[in-house]
Structure formats: structure tokens, C-alpha cells
Image: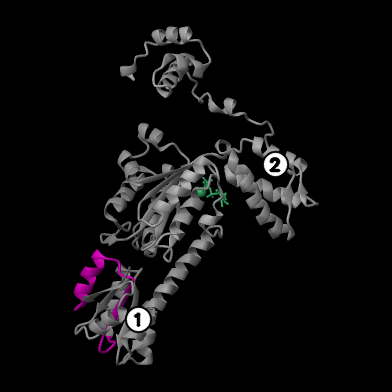
Amino acid sequence: MKHILLISREGALKDPLTQAMGQDKLKLDWAQSFQVAFSLATKLQYDVALLEVNKFDASAAEFIDKFLGHNPQTMLIPVSPNAAVEHVTEAMRRGAVDFVHQPTGAAEILERIWKCIENRRLKNEVDFLRHTQPVIYRFDDIVGVSPPMKRVFSILGKVAPTDATVLIMGETGTGKELIAGAIHFNSPRARNSFIKVNCAALPENLLESELFGHEKGAFTGAHRQRVGRFEQANGGSIFLDEIGDMGASTQAKILRVLQEQQFERLGGTQTINVDVRVMAATNKDLPELINTGQFREDLFYRLNVVTIELAPLRERVEDIEPLVKFFLRKYAFQICNRAMEMTGPAMKMLQDYHWPGNIRQLQNVIERAVIMCESDKISPEHIALFDRRPLKKRESALEIPDGGIKLMEVERLLIVQALERTGWVQKNAAKLLGISPRVINYKIQKHKIKRESI
Ligand SMILES: Nc1ncnc2c1ncn2[C@@H]1O[C@H](COP(=O)(O)OP(=O)(O)OP(=O)(O)O)[C@@H](O)[C@H]1O
Ligand SMILES: [Mg+2]
């Protein structure tokens, strides 16, 4: 829904415009005076403001300055029957995006409003693409056949059409950004901006200014007012990457945006309202950060309306072959302009590897192999893996934490887990652990494990 503010004493355009809008996704509010316009604009961020004036005089020019000073994201269009060239130039110089010379029919004014909205959307999109790799996010480009990926697809289908906040967790290179982008571009917000912010890349005060913007003079070096990423994302989605690295003050502000869709620019007093879908990602263990007091629990629950966990590639080996084929098709044509295939031993080698860099690493390995291979068959010698030892599942399942661990405690935890999994049938739990029922019974006594104490 786009919001239009008509600022006009008589409101002559109100009815014709409302009629012309029909079923369009536009909503029109009418402000009879400059004062009412200011007060309405503090409650809602308007996409377009139409300033209907009989004569474009000094007070209209002054209003544009003041209004755009407070609402830099709104596109302002003066509408006037008496407009000379110098008036139009003056209005544009002050930041108006168009000038309607009356008499002009409501339908044409609407058309020009839509054009401005589309231009702004394109500008935001170009800004976004300029700052990120040019990825096109589509569900079809997410490859996966494993049970964990099937679960992800089923969640995607359900959450994409909604406004629900999504928290995406997974190791580096598991596709967190790809998933966030796919959700946005398959949602009703797809025509609006998808804004990405890496929360780990900036120190806290710069991050806040990046997210929420700042007023002129808010801090040393703030020479001009700046619109933040939340305002740019209005009507669309924002993707907060590496959210686990966000400082306490920013966390509090993000919580408020999630609860109230409101914030102030740094150094500003005006409350800004936005309509933004929030998606966040992290490769950190947020519950662990909550335990150590580095992440707010209330923010976690707000973000966690829908959680998507992306399993590491080594836990979904079935996906390796389809991913290899997907990347091979892409790079073979991009780089060599012909089809290529993977020999059996090369595929086996890829399937045995433990992929610490996950899908991004797999993608890079395939790209390199395509470059290195002179024929149309990729064999093991074209594949560069920095650790060729296959890591068997059994070896990787248990890992000693950096701070060490007590063997006795591990034993106790495993016994409890085995008992829980087998419904506390000792015989079956013993089998799961490869010990005799007598030994498990002895250990249960030793560790004083009791069902109700768990
Ligand atoms: N299931 C998938 N199918 C196809 N390509 C994928 C898939 N998952 C990830 N990729 C590709 O792998 C690369 C890394 O993905 P992405 O950048 O989304 O990962 P990430 O989890 O955000 O990583 P990081 O934590 O390092 O930021 C991208 O080029 C992405 O397109
Ligand atoms: Mg990422």
C-alpha cells in the first residue's frame, strides 16, 4: 500500500483522485493546512506528497524545504494552475520530483505519481545491487533434496507471503542471504526494496546511523542529514546480517522497531514510522550469547517468530550431487560455453569432504575445477580441497570444546540421551550405546540418573 498526502486548502483534487485510484494500491490523506501536513507526516511516512497551491510563492517554497527536511523519503510534487518556468525550477531545486501544471486530469496525476514511485523503487534497487553481489533470488535457484532442505522449502512457501519476522541460522556459506532474498522476492513486498545491512561490518555508532539515519550535526562529521536503511526499506524488507555481533544499544533500538515500527534518527526528536519486514541472520549460537549476556532474550524471541535453520553441508550429503550439477551447469556455460561433467571418482571425492565453508566453498571449488579442466570431464586432479582427509560422521559428531570437557559428564549426558530416545527402556538404551544392560544399569546408579530428575 502506498500512501499519498494531498496538501490543499480546498481539497479540489481529493474526490477526483480518490475516484481515479479505484482499486489501485494507494491511500489518500488530505491535509487542509501545512500544519496538519506536518502532524500527519509524523504519524505515517508518505510515499508522495501533492502540494496543491494556487500560486507557487515564497511560503510554498519554504514549506517544501521544511517538509522535505523532516521527511526526506517522501517525494513531493507541487500542483498549481499558475506556474511559470522559474517556479518549476525553484521547486525542483528545493527537492520536488515533478511539477503538475493544472488543469491536468486526475488520471494523469495518478500516472505521474506511479512513475515517481517506480523511479524511487528502481533507485533503491540499483543502490542495493551496487552494494552487493548481483544475485537474483528465486526459489528455483535454491537447490536441495535432503530432508533438512525439504523442511526449509516447506517453511519458505508458508512464510514468504506473510510479514512474519524471520531468523535464519546457519554456518558460513549455508545460504542465509540467498534464503532471505528469496523470501523477499517471493513476497507481496517484492516490488519494494530489499535492503541488506551487515551488522558486523561497522562499529556501533556508525551502525546506528546506517540503520536509523542521523540529523545534521548529530555527531562530529555529520555534516548533512542522512536517511537510514530502515527508512529506505519502507514498504519492503530489511535483512540484518550477522545480528549476533550487534551491540546492546542497537539491540534495544531494533527491539523497538520490531515492537512499534518506530524510531528516531540519531540526534533527532521526530519519531519516524515505517512498515518494514525484518529478517535477520547469524552464524553464532544466539541462545549461548543470551546465556553470557551478550544478546537480549526479548529481542531473540521477537526475531524468532519463524526460525529457519540451515544445516551444514556435511549433514546433508544428499545435496552435494545436485549442487555440483547446478554449479557445473552454471560455470561450464559461463566460462567455457559448453557442457561438462564430473567423473565418478571426482564426485565421490566431493561427497566425502567435510565442507567447512559449506555451499560457498563448493561453488568456488567447482568454478576453479571448470577453469582448470581442459576436457569436458572433471576428474580429482582438477579439484582443490585444502584438507583431503574425509571426516567420517562418527568422528565429527563429537568435538572437544576449546575449554576442554569432563569425560564423566559426557558419559552421563550420553546415557540420559540414550534413555530418553528409547523411552527409558534400559535394554534398548544399552544397545544404542554398545554396552550390556548390566553395565548401563551400573552406570545409571553411578551417575545417580533418575527419570524425574531430568
Ligand atoms: N541451496 C543452495 N542452492 C544453490 N546455491 C546456494 C544454496 N545455498 C547457498 N548457495 C550459494 O552459496 C553462496 C553462499 O550463500 P550465502 O551468501 O547466502 O551464504 P551465507 O549463509 O549468507 O554465508 P555467510 O554466513 O558467510 O554470509 C551464494 O553464492 C549462494 O547463492
Ligand atoms: Mg551472508
* Left or right: 308 as drawn, with respect to 313: left
Q: From this viewpoint, is residue 357 visible? A: no
Residue for badge 1: 110
Label 2 to label 1: alpha-carbon separation: 57 Å
Q: Residue at position x 51%, y 44% from top?
A: 149
Where residue 298 appears, as percent x and y from the top left, is 30, 41
The residue range painted magenta reads 31-57
Where residue 109 appears, as percent x and y from the top left, is 34, 84
**319 or 125, which is in the foreground?**
319
**329 or 297, which is in the foreground?**
329
Q: From this viewpoint, is residue 272 visible? A: yes
Asked where in the image residue 454 lies, by quadrant, the reply is top left
Specify the amino acid type for callout 1: Leu
Q: How many marks?
A: 2
* Left or right: 22 as drawn, with respect to 328: left
* Mark 1 Cα shell of 10 Å, populated few (<14), some (14-19), many (≥20): some
- Decide: is 400 above or below 177: above
Residue for badge 2: 347
Q: Is residue 47 magenta?
A: yes
- Decide: is 203 above or below 138: above
- Decide: is 47 above or below 416: below
Query: Is label 2's Cβ within 8 Å of ligand 1?
Result: no
Where residue 332 appears, as percent x and y from the top left, is 71, 55
- Say whether marks 2 and 1 touch (CB < 8 Å): no
From the image, which quarter does the N terminus lie in?
A: bottom left
